[in-house]
Image (cartoon, rainbow, N blue to C red):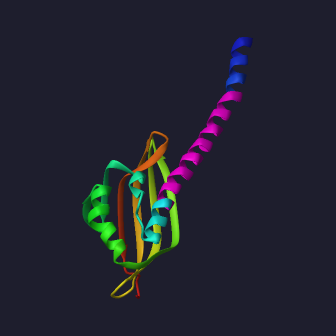
């Protein structure tokens, strides 16, 4: 009886420590996922996607405004790269991100406004959202799937 009581007391002291430690490790993962998304966003704003391939899994899938763009490598070569070359500026504002985990996968939801000033043509101001699925590859988080869309703000 005394042994069982000691085990119960020891367990009650250890279990809360283990439970409390888990959110701290998830906080590190959350910050790492946010850093990947932030680095991608910064590259878009610099109009230079050089090196962003390392933020994506080789088998990634990109979806944009109702269309499938293929892997990130395909999207970069045939869509994003040429698009960035045609822009004078691209700026995000009112950026918010939320990250949660389902097992070993991170799900990120972003909302933002963006303003595109092309080298020629009219400026575009939009509301945007993105959902990304990331998985850990080695010591890094990689984007496996990204879906983003935008719309003209109401009253604009």
Image quadrant containing the C terminus: bottom left
Reply above or below: 119 against 51.
below
Reply above or below: 118 against 21.
below
Q: Position of residue 126 (x, y in %)?
A: 40, 78
Reply above or below: 15 against 105.
above
Q: Position of residue 108 (x, y in %)?
A: 45, 56
Residue 146 location, quadrant? bottom left
Q: Is residue 70 visible?
A: yes
Nearest to the observer: residue 117 or residue 100: 117
Q: Is residue 1 visible?
A: no
Nearest to the observer: residue 94 or residue 3: 94
Q: Position of residue 36 (x, y in %)?
A: 48, 55
Nearest to the observer: residue 91 or residue 49: 49
Residue drawn where x is 42% and y is 71% of the image = 47
Q: Main secondary structure of the magenta part?
A: helix
Left or right for 109, reference 30: left
Residue 27 on the magenta span = yes
Residue drawn where x is 41% and y is 71% of the image = 128
Nearest to the observer: residue 33 or residue 151: 33
Residue 104 on the magenta span = no
Left or right for 57, reference 101: left
Q: Position of residue 131 (x, y in %)?
A: 40, 59
Reply above or below: 149 against 119.
above
**What's the magenta region?**
13-38
């Amino acid at each position: 009886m005394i042994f069982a009581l000691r085990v119960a007391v020891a367990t009650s002291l250890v279990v809360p420590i283990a439970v409390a430690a888990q959110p701290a490790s998830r906080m590190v993962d959350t910050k790492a996922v946010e850093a990947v998304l932030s680095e991608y966003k910064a590259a878009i704003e610099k109009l230079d996607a050089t090196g962003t391939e390392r933020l994506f899994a080789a088998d990634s899938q990109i979806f944009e405004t109702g269309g499938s763009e293929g892997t990130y490598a395909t999207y970069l070569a045939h869509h994003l790269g040429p698009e960035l070359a045609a822009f004078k500026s691209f700026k995000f504002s009112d950026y918010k991100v939320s990250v949660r985990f389902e097992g070993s996968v991170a799900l990120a939801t972003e909302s933002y406004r963006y303003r595109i000033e092309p080298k020629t043509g009219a400026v575009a101001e939009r509301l945007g959202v993105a959902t990304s699925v990331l998985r850990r590859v080695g010591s890094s988080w990689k984007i496996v799937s990204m879906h983003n869309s935008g719309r003209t703000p109401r009253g604009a």
